[in-house]
Amino acid sequence: MAGAGLSDLAVAVSEAGGLGSIPCAMLTPEGMRKEIGSFRERTQGPLNVNFFCHPEPAPNPAAEQAWRKRLSVYYVELGLDSNATSAAPPRKPFDMAACEVVEELGPEVASFHFGLPSAELLDGGKRTRAKVLSTATTVEEAKWLEGQGCDAIIAQGLEAGGHRGTFLGSEVWAQVGTFALVPQIADAVQVPVIAAGGIGDARGLVAALALGASAVLMGTAYLFCPESTISPLYRQSLANVPDNGTGLTNVFSGRPARGIVNRIVREVGPISDLAPDFPSAAEAIAPLRAASEARGSDDLMQMWAGQAAPLGRPQRAADFTKRVAREALDLMLVPNLD
Ligand SMILES: Cc1cc2nc3c(=O)[nH]c(=O)nc-3n(C[C@H](O)[C@H](O)[C@H](O)COP(=O)(O)O)c2cc1C
């Protein structure tokens, strides 16, 4: 979860028997080395490193200008310079520099969002014998990923927090929910399926296994853990979000992602034709997010969260991981009918 957790969270999950992930989409190669090094120092557990692999958009000054014009009312309201730029690190696709880090540090698993990197880069990752995972939001995407040699497919349902992993097609309104998606993908591919989206506790885990998944990926539930790096204001909003309090929006990055619906999502989106291509939309909106937060208001903040957020409770990540596994095993115990 780029921007929401680093090695502290990954160590806790892997120590508890899960597969901890270090999100690398917003890290420099140096940052990756530091986080992976910190992980290896603290645990012998397996590590997943996660990357984006989106196409980088060509510069489009006209689109950028129209976007800034749409946002100008908020710049005025917050007293910001209309040309302010983002202080946050940009989202970068997996490239040769990242590939070298993977080759050098040999994580057990490398996972990708928005498809897969080029064959040349992917081969670099595979030389390390890392298992390769990627996200599918449709059966077509799952089959494509299997055809490219993915070792397992993450089936990401509509309920999921964060960006839709969609890379073939762009119909946001046609996105499939986890309950319908997981069995269809499980029927369509031979490799293991990892269910993601709206799984907040042991009940969701057991349901996903019954639907044909071999494992689950939980994101939003871990935001509640003290090891996540989200801000206090984000944490507070997350604790109060109702079942229908999240939505798909492109206003923060240019790609549809599920987050807490707040003022800027309602007023500018949820889906805006003016948002420049991913990830360029983030550049103009980032100063507004930071200024809003500095004023103690979540009105203009980006707060990714999935539909199961109300199931979340603050708990240390290792305790949460073990609890979910234990409760799932209890739920799966079939009573003796004799
Ligand atoms: C705060 C946040 C950040 C995320 N960042 C990433 C990311 O960097 N890479 C990625 O592959 N998926 C990312 N996701 C999506 C998750 O991998 C996963 O699909 C999702 O969290 C599952 O649904 P859930 O949030 O309902 O558990 C993110 C999700 C959240 C909530």
Image: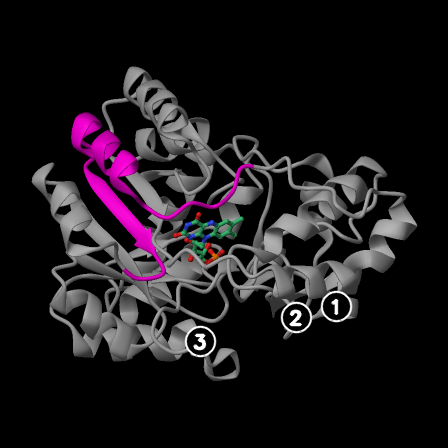
State the residue in front, 215 or 25.
Answer: 25
- What amino acid type is highlighted by mark number 1? Val
State the residue in front, 270 or 207.
Answer: 270
According to the image, label 2 marks what residue? 274
Task: Tell which circle, 3 or 2, labels the residue nearer the N-terminal end.
Answer: 3
Could you say which quadrant of the image residue 268 lies in?
Answer: bottom right
Q: Is residue 18 visible?
A: no
Q: Is mark 2 within 8 Å of ligand 1?
A: no
According to the image, label 3 marks what residue? 177
Expressed as whole percent of the image width and height from the top left, the position of residue 161 reads 52, 58
Residue at image location 42% in from the left, 33% down from the top: 318
Expressed as whole percent of the image width and height from the top left, the position of residue 106 reads 18, 31
Range drawn in magenta: 89-115
Expressed as whole percent of the image width and height from the top left, the position of residue 196 reads 39, 61
**Residue 145: assigned label:** none
Say if the magenta span includes residue 101.
Answer: yes
Residue at image location 90% in from the left, 43% down from the top: 79
The answer to whether marks 3 and 2 mark residues whose Cβ atoms lie closer than 8 Å is no
- Total numbered badges shown on the rendered structure: 3
The answer to whether marks 2 and 1 mark residues whose Cβ atoms lie closer than 8 Å is yes
